Image: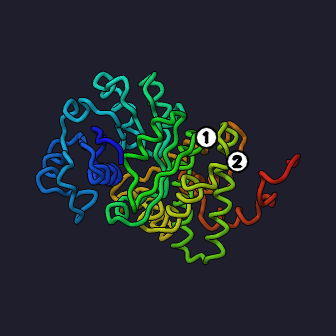
Amino acid sequence: MGNSKKVTVLGGGSFGTAVANFTASNGHDVYQWMRNEQQAQDTQKYRENSRYLPGYPLNDALQITSDLNLALEGAELVFVSIPSKSFRSVIKLIKPKLSPTAMVVSTAKGIEPGSFTLMSQILEQELPGQPIGVLSGPNFAKEIVQSQQTGTVIASEDDQLIETVQDALSAPTFRVYANHDRYGVELGGALKNIYAIITGMAAALGCGHNTQAMLLTRSLAEMGRFAQELGANPMTFLGLAGVGDLILTCTSDLSRNYRVGFAIGEGKSLDQAIEQIGQVAEGVNTLKIIKQKADELEVYMPLVSALHGVLFEQKPLAEVAAGLMQGEQNYDVEFTVKNHD
């Protein structure tokens, strides 16, 4: 590891806590900022994030605070682990407090409604000239803090930022891969949450491995098709931030989005499912945004349309599932076929 740096993590959720703890364990000077003063005080005192990562002791060197000035003063690397709905407001708060050379990395997996703006695009808009990046991949926080073997992707056009993040996070159990397709990496992190809801529903309905394999593969095809239309590289979706994150989120009940889908498959309403989970399931909001954009761009996304029909158009689940099997039968791997409709 290189020289110790001051690193700030904004956000008190499970992933932000995992990143902060991991970076502190790597010998950096790490501050984690939580908006809720009581949560910050309790986490600092008891060395445990009892709300989001109960039972996992935090590194003694990690400082938790609700004082934004203290957290950001002299910070060289800032991770923003804030839910998408609050992301822009927090970035506005930190703007006057940031060093002009501070590197800012989003770990949020979502899209701002209305404007169809990704989190790193919000960083571009609110922090012009600041080096920015995106961290994404198959990264369950509980497994990171358990030191299970994990890989992630840092995406940025700035090679120095990539090297800095790799230096801050890399460890024997945590491997950090580089990618310059920031847009593709970020879209992968947002889109896969939609498909986790679908696979959760399928599991609750008793669907077998054949169905799961088909859903995962066709989900990947939809993701690549949509991302290419927006200028991303579809090959990015063959990496950890694409298929890796998709497999993880769509096959594990540690995924909030999967659990929401499972609850709906058991017959609960969307509101009941969200209440049962008790945490933000980004896929629900992302679904609305992606459906609107896909219709606008005329991108064929039958799984997205089907889930939207079930959750927001009161269409019967059985009817929608039958409709999917009767839909268009097109090429399996689209990017290997030229000049087709």
The residue at 40%/46% (across/down) is 167
Q: Label for residue 225?
A: 2
Q: Specify which label sits upstream in the sequence, 1 or 2.
A: 2
Foreground: disc 1 or disc 2: 2
Q: Label for residue 292?
A: 1
Placement of 278 over or under 189, stated as above or below: below
Q: Residues within 10 Å of mark 1 (few under 14, many from 20)?
A: some
The residue at 50%/61% (across/down) is 249
Q: Residues within 10 Å of mark 2 (few under 14, many from 20)?
A: some
Tag 1 near tag 2, CB within 8 Å: no
The residue at 45%/33% (across/down) is 132
Placement of 299 over or under 193, stated as above or below: above
Q: Which of the two residues, 119 or 263, is positioned nearer the viewer here?
A: 119
Q: Is residue 322 left or right of residue 119?
A: right
Residue 135 position within the rendered picture, expressed as x and y whole percent measured from the top left: 46, 46
Q: CA distance from mark 1 to mark 2?
A: 15 Å
The residue at 32%/61% (across/down) is 145
Residue 271 position within the rendered picture, expressed as x and y whole percent measured from the top left: 41, 56
Residue farthest right in this picture? 339
> For the residue marked with disc 1, what is the amino acid?
Gln
Placement of 149 over or under 135, stated as above or below: below
